[in-house]
Image (cartoon, grey):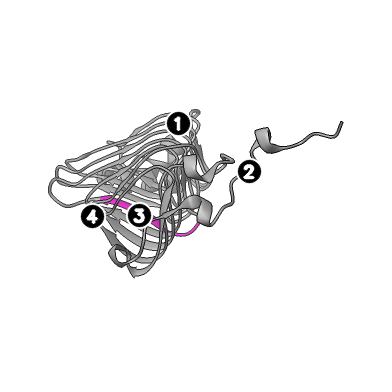
Amino acid sequence: MHEDLLAHMDRIRSTLGYRPVSDLLADAENVFIDPFSALVSRQARIGSGNIFYPHVRIDVGAGVLTIGDRNRFFEGTRMDAADDGSIEIGDENEFGPHAVAVLANTPGAAISIGHRIRLRGRIDVLGTTRLEDGSQILGDITAVDVSLAGGDSYADPDPDARGAVLKGRGRAKGITLDTGTVINGDGDFALFPVEAQSVYHPKPADAASVILPG
């Protein structure tokens, strides 16, 4: 790329509060697959080993946004910590595929995302929301002021030991779920039952009940 063009792009981004393209190109700690389409606020605190796919946008106004290590931000992911909002993200989480938005852009908004969490689909996370380790939101869901208890990740063989799950489509507001539970909703999630995850994912056979050949 012509040096003058790169300098022009860097100057525009710096003026708008984003890290310059040259800075993303030189980042040895994280991977920006397309640094020319990624917009990353200078104020975002980012760990190492993260992978950012094209068209990721991270905005930090007067709020605070921290990202841990080894997360994957698929294309179209958006983060916004405006006003006094805060977003805290742990390690080894997956944001996408499809458009995921984590928006702490209203007064007092605080979003906490632990470790080994999946947000997969068209997901909006808003308000005061806590997603503990291993929890998941899957589908086309707007989650506002929710609390999902932690547990093992989706890869654990015992579904009832996994973090809580919201799946389906619609709006989940003020929902609190315990470890190993799920709501499979379509519309207002408050109208749908809380179920054990083993309803959808059978538990592995109990090793103690298996009779080995003599």
Q: Residue at x 41, y 49 (%)?
A: 181
First of labels 4, 1 by sequence position:
1
Res 13 label: none
**Mark 4 sits on what residue?**
174
Give the Cα separation between the discs numbered 1 and 3. 19 Å
Q: Residue at x 22, y 51 (%)?
A: 127
- Disc 3/disc 4 C-alpha distance (Å): 18 Å
Disc 1 residue crowd, few under 14, some 14–19, many 20+, Cα 10 Å: some
Residue mark closest to the camera, 3 vs 4:
4
Which amino acid type corresponds to the residue marked 1 in the rendered image? Asp
Q: Secondary structure at mark 1?
A: loop
Q: Secondary structure at mark 2?
A: loop
- Looking at marks 1 and 2 on the same chain, the residue that comes earlier in the sequence is marked by 1
The answer to whether mark 2 and mark 4 are in CB contact below 8 A is no
Does label 2 or label 3 sit earlier along the sequence? Answer: 3
Q: How far apart are the two marked residues, 2 and 4, measured between alpha carbons?
A: 32 Å
Between disc 1 and disc 2, the foreground one is 2
Of marks 1 and 3, which one's residue comes earlier in the chain? Answer: 1
Q: Earlier along the polypeptide chain: callout 3 or callout 4?
A: 3
Disc 3 on helix, strand or loop? strand
Q: Amino acid at mark 2?
A: Pro
What range is drawn magenta here? 97-103
> In the rendered structure, does residue 57 fall within the stretch colored magenta?
no
- Mark 4 and mark 1: span between their CA atoms? 29 Å
